[in-house]
Amino acid sequence: MKYSLLILLFTLVPFQFFGQVQNQESYANSITALELKEKLYTYSSDEFEGRETGTKGLTIAINYLKEHYIDLEVPSAKADGSYFQNVPLKLIKTPKVSMSVKEQSFDYFQDFISISGGESIFMNEDTILVGYGINDDNYNDYEDIDVTGKIVVAIGGEPKGENNNYLVSGTAEISKWSNNRQELSSKLNTAKEQGAKAFFLINDSMFKLYAPYYRARDEQGGESNLSLDVNEDDAMYGFLVGQSMEAVLLNGNEIKIDYNQESESISSDNVAAMIKGSEKPDEYIVLSAHLDHIGMHDGEVFNGADDDGSGTVAILEIAEAFKSALKEGNGPKRSIIFLHVTGEEKGLLGSQYYTDYDPIVPLAQTVANLNIDMIGRTDPKRLEGKRNYIYLIGSDKLSTDLHTLSEEVNSKYTNIELDYTYNDENDPNRYYYRSDHYNFAKNNIPVIFYFNGTHDDYHQASDTPDKIQYDLLENRTRLVFHTAWELANRDEAVRVDKAVE
Ligand SMILES: [Zn+2]
């Protein structure tokens, strides 16, 4: 008796000492390539019809997720127990717009297109010229002009200095103000920030590029885009025009715009489950992945296995691992929210609704957001480094603690090559702004975005589950699990030391 008790004591001491780490690793090991694969073959199957927001496929997807959490016995994050957070959306159709200057009237598609808008409205006002429409530290067209409530007109491009360098960059490099991808949104958003009511961009080459595309889309049913269906007092009426309107707009004439919005309400849902923390239940870690994809085109299903089936099944597996821990009395100290957001492909709508209109738990008590969007493949453009890598974006932007924790956890448990290529401020892809974590980051909630980069199957029908590298998906999912575990269980919550105003 005595002898065996001694042995027991000897074995108990180290066990308690290392027990937590061993447990953590055994829960992580319950996340397997096989289980991820099984789930992903279902979630990205043709039956889910590409999970486009507002379609039957999306309804199938949200019900699948809900059933999964019910089976796991992981409760809803919502007080009503429903798992679904309704996200009101509207499908905006091509507006009916009549536009005239003096006696001359202009035609939609022929002379202008509407690129943003709101409720139906009639405007009859003088226009104000704002040069290129740039507001930058090195060059500002809005200095000394008050455009509040006005209709402003900007020309395309950006100015150069005497040495032929661009004034904004100070080099031969163009900036976001004239880069094809960003010019329109940069200038439109700036006019909005300055308080303008309507905005015209005169850019003939861009107009010639966009107008046929808008027309084709209109002919296919008039649906232009989805947006949140919430009260918008600050709607911005934006127009892109070609050469035919240049002269009348540059003359600062009075313009008449009769804008009639046509939209259709659409209902969609985020799915949210939660494991409550044992010691600090009012501090939250949000794990997110978008549940939607881009649907079907010409009868073909766009399966979205990597985008973002991979992130979706990763979160399901992580939830299962935390649930096993909870069952054995090792539940997280802080609460963990498993958040599957809708409408990402339509403009981060589900996450925007969550953060801007209806956070299920207070943002002020949200410690961090780990967002997963595409972690099952590799980037063919990445020519150097280990196969076992992942791009991390945002980890050091708001919280040094988070970045340090993330690095430590990886070197202790997963040893994945953490690649910060796209974390660069000047990354032209701007990935930091392009997935759901951004809606958390803009509220000064520290985020990490896990991402494998794009590939030839990105947003193609060929993004299928057979192309996923399940061993990598397993490693990366375990990394997110360990990071979430540490965030939830460390004594001190990660601090925000680089808040943005
Ligand atoms: Zn995505």
Image: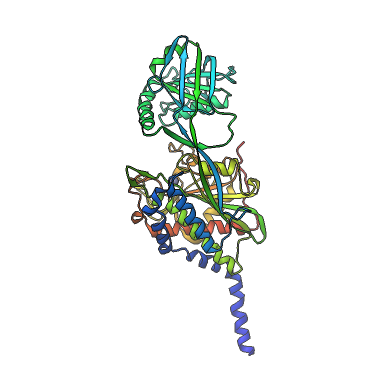
Which residue sits at x=53%, y=48%? 270
Question: Which of these two is toward me, 105 or 275?
Answer: 105
Where in the figure is residue 346, as x and y percent of width and height?
A: 46, 40
In which quadrant of the rendered view does residue 174 lie?
Answer: top left
Which residue sits at x=52%, y=15%? 127
Q: Do we see residue 190 in this rendering?
A: yes
Residue 403 vertical position relative to residue 209 in the rendered view, above or below? below
Where in the figure is residue 83, as x and y percent of width and height?
A: 56, 54
Residue 323 vertical position relative to residue 295 in the rendered view, above or below? below
**Residue sitting at the far bottom:** 1
Question: Which of these two is toward me, 441 or 197?
Answer: 197
Where in the figure is residue 432, as x and y percent of width and height?
A: 49, 41
In which quadrant of the rendered view does residue 222 lie?
Answer: top left
Residue 197 vertical position relative to residue 53 in the rendered view, above or below? above
Please state, as top left, top right, bottom left or bottom right, where the N terminus lies in the image. bottom right
Q: Do we see residue 410 in this rendering?
A: no
Where in the figure is residue 94, as x and y percent of width and height?
A: 44, 29
Q: Which colour scheme is used?
A: rainbow
Instruction: Please give left or right for residue 317 compared with residue 215 in the image.
Output: right
